[in-house]
Amino acid sequence: MNLEDIRKEIDKVDSQIAQLFRERMGLALEVAKTKEKNNLAVVNSTREKEILRRISDEIGEPLDGYGRILFNTLFDLSRSYQNSYLSRVSDIAERIEKALEETPKLFPKKAVVACQGVPGSYSQSACEKLFEVPNTIYFNSFEGVFNAVEKGLCQYGILPIENSSYGSVGTVYDLMRNYNFHIVKSIRLRVNHNLLAKPGTKMKDVKEIFSHEQAIGQCGEFLKTLKDVKITVCENTARAAKMVAESDRTDVAAISSRDCIELYGLESLNNNIQVSDNNYTRFICISKNLEIYPGANKISLMLSVPHRPNALYHMIAKFSSLGVNLTKLESRPIPGSDFEFMFYFDMEASVYSPEFVSLLGQLENQPEIFVFLGCYSETI
């Protein structure tokens, strides 16, 4: 046969597969109805393993591995179809519908906002870009920001979550699983780092530099050029500038923003010392309540997967089947567990899609951890 003849035969087989797929999914729906009547769980791992063994023997080598992948995918689709029937109305769907009804049409101009650090921080800059008239309250740590929002001390909180040059802010991701919050907005802020010192200090005088670990990482190439200079990590870039201003020493400097020059009476010894001129930090704005403003097109989730082979692949396949574009996947170890991880997903998706909300309902009803972090838009 020539290529055209082969393709015609493939088309015939594909049509047969399509018909058999419809029949199989119809039978899966009947299984769901039966399970509902008898109050049985959707997942039957023993049954799935039996099918895989049988199919593997029937297909034989060298295609048995491909066959197992195909049928594992079928299992995922069947479970998804069954869950969509069994969870026709889910808690997450009701929460999202309520948020869409109650959230104001415009993002607030004024609010009490929690930020980590002191005046002059990049978090403050992000806050002032999101809110026209923020009442900013500063906390020593990222955990303080989460606490303030969860306890209602502040309506919103601003937290850095990742940098284009130095990656994710691990501390913030680790704290996420300990607090109840929702992401209502995000912003990408261009970050230009400067080396600040007391007036009169020369570059050759500097023996110690203070800054946050993220800023130090973003300025790694510049710092490599310095000899016999101690690098000390502190909790915030603006705090570093304040420490230098209040110190009795004249041989210290801070990596910080230009806003800190006037705030703390410092001078810049070197400007734009970050690795890249296109250095951006992404900040999230969090709230205790679920708020979904018009134009929201990003969704963030936090979830775990079973500790078994292909579990993450099967999870990602659920989003892929709906054409959802995953923009970030972050994994963090779960304390007290052996090689088990919490996964954080960012994706381009809409809560106006019934199919996607149905998938959220299925994820919510699974035995593993699932947290809907929010649906929001990002300001650049």
Image (cartoon, helix red, strand yellow):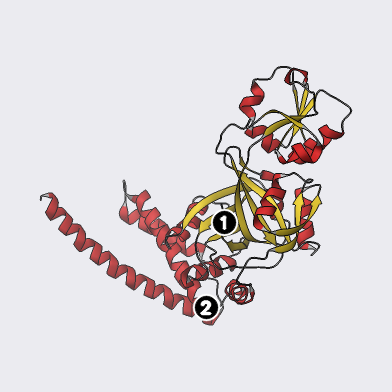
- Tag count: 2
Looking at numbered disc 1 in the image, what kind of residue is underneath it? Glu
Residue 106 appearing in the image: yes
Estimate how packed mark 2 is, as few (under 14), some (14 to 19) or many (20 or more) residues with alpha carbons within 10 Å. few
Estimate how packed mark 1 is, as few (under 14), some (14 to 19) or many (20 or more) residues with alpha carbons within 10 Å. some
Question: Which is more toward the observer, 337 or 4?
Answer: 4
Toward the right, the furthest residue is: 248
At mark 1, the secondary structure is strand
- Give the left or right position of residue 173, taking residue 54 as reference: right
Question: Which is more toward the observer, 97 or 267?
Answer: 267
Name the residue that disc number 1 marks. 378
Task: Give x and y (percent) for residue 32.
Answer: 47, 76
Q: Residue at x 58, y 39 (%)?
A: 279
Residue 235 appearing in the image: no
Q: Is residue 310 above or below residue 376?
A: above
Question: Which is more toward the observer, 144 or 186?
Answer: 186
Looking at numbered disc 2 in the image, what kind of residue is underneath it? Arg
Task: Give x and y (percent) for residue 44.
Answer: 51, 66
Toward the bottom, the furthest residue is: 37
Q: Earlier in the sequence, mark 2 or mark 1?
A: 2
Contact (Cβ within 8 Å) of mark 2 with mark 1: no
Name the residue that disc number 2 marks. 88
Q: CA distance from mark 2 to mark 1?
A: 31 Å
